[in-house]
Image: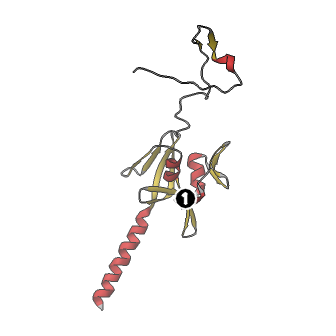
Amino acid sequence: MLVRTIAAMVVIAALSAGAAAKEARATIVYDDVATQLDRVNIDAGQLWITPVDLTRATGFVIKPQGVCREELCFPLPKSRKAEFVRQENNIDWFSLSAFAQLVHQPFAYDEALATWYFGLRSDQRQGLASLRAPNFTLPDMDGKLHSLTDFRGKKVLLVTWASW
């Protein structure tokens, strides 16, 4: 009986230590701005933060239509809602790392410094000021010159090829 009681106490202590180890402090670097968060939850390599801290660290807000910042809004797949939001001990949590994966945003975690760095999202990495092709002029098969601007307002399919 004493052995079972001691074993049960060891299991409870181990579970309590594991639960306490999940919540920690962390620094989030987002858009090259560092924000110290007093309460984060790290679970299986995923960073969970409160919605208030999400807004404070990233400027994003959770809305019914998705995760939004100004006019930019990323819908969360309804079938995968549990990957992004959850409630634990009456605290709402949002997985910033799952969101980063959704929007193709690389991130890195330094456990020793308790720091998470989030790089540019895919929409920020395009490197194009717009999706407009620059104007150019090329001859057709008969040698007549055509410019891309000649086709403004019409659908155009551009086929390109390179030898390198």
The image quadrant where one finds the N terminus is: bottom left
Q: Residue furthest front?
A: 142
Q: Residue furthest right?
A: 153
Give residue 159's position: percent from left, percent from top: 54, 24
Residue at (53, 32) in percent of width and height: 126
Residue at (43, 49) in percent of width and height: 115
The image quadrant where one finds the C terminus is: top left
Give residue 155's position: percent from left, percent from top: 66, 27
Q: Residues within 10 Å of mark 1 (few under 14, many from 20)?
A: few
Q: Residue furthest left?
A: 3
Q: Which residue is mark 1?
A: 80
Give residue 141's position: percent from left, percent from top: 57, 12
**In front: 164, or 106?**
164
Q: Is residue 12 left or right of residue 118?
A: left
Q: Is residue 2 left or right of residue 63?
A: left
Instruction: Name above or below for residue 86 compared with residue 111.
Output: below
Residue type at mark 1?
Arg
